[in-house]
Image (cartoon, helix red, strand yellow):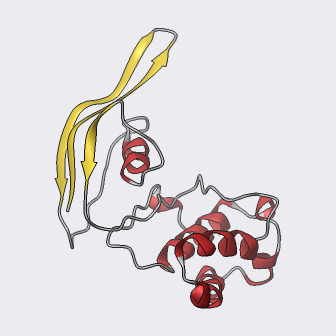
Amino acid sequence: MIRIENLTKSYRTPKGRHYVFKDLNIELPTGKSVALVGRNGAGKSTLLRMIGGIDRPDKGRILTDQTISWPVGLAGGFQGSLTGRENVKFVARLYAKKDELQDKVSFVEEFSELGKYFDMPIKTYSSGMRSRLGFGLSMAFDFDYYLVDEVMAVGDA
């Protein structure tokens, strides 16, 4: 389970402080799919970044004893000048054992269905290609929770 206690996140703006959420409390169950649905700017991506440990709240806590993926979505986090393969190897070195590295790279190469583009710089990818690479990379690892942002963007239309 992921427990969120009294979570507050705000940003300074020219018009004063803007609260994305204030004193948010929620419990996300283990073994269930949960969707965060809301208008643009409602704080969905911000919350996922905090759950994934990429962003920090102003106050409050996020508690879990489970493993959580990084948020997968359009934003990516890939290095544009590196190829898909090179980006996957970089992340796999952080999350996989040395003897698993090639299996992880092969899994992502097959899963993402990028063909020759897997060995081309990511800056040449469409947004759908980047999303498939990111989603495949996340699926290559066994997490208890997978955070998927902009789920409609994972894949080309």
Which corner quadrant holds the N terminus? Answer: bottom left
> What is the total number of numbered labels drawn onto the structure image?
0
Residue 148 image offset from top left, x and y in percent:
43, 61
Residue 56 image offset from top left, x and y in percent:
41, 39
Q: Residue extending furthest front?
A: 98
**Of 69 and 122, the residue lying toward us:** 69
Residue 6 in view (yes/no): yes
Which corner quadrant holds the C terminus? Answer: bottom right
The reply, left or right, for residue 69 in relation to residue 131 is left
Q: Residue extending furthest top?
A: 15
**Of 54 and 18, the residue lying toward us:** 54
Residue 43 image offset from top left, x and y in percent:
38, 38
The reply, left or right, for residue 6 in relation to residue 15 is left
The reply, left or right, for residue 81 in relation to residue 24 is right
Q: Residue at x 83, y 72 (%)?
A: 120
Residue 107 in view (yes/no): no
Compared with residue 108, is residue 126 higher up or lower down, i.e. above or below?
above
**Of 116 and 146, the residue lying toward us:** 146
Q: Residue at x 43, y 38 (%)?
A: 40
The reply, left or right, for residue 97 in relation to residue 102 is left
Residue 41 image offset from top left, x and y in percent:
43, 35
Q: Quadrant of residue 11?
A: top left
Q: Residue at x 55, y 76 (%)?
A: 136
Q: Residue at x 37, y 64 (%)?
A: 68
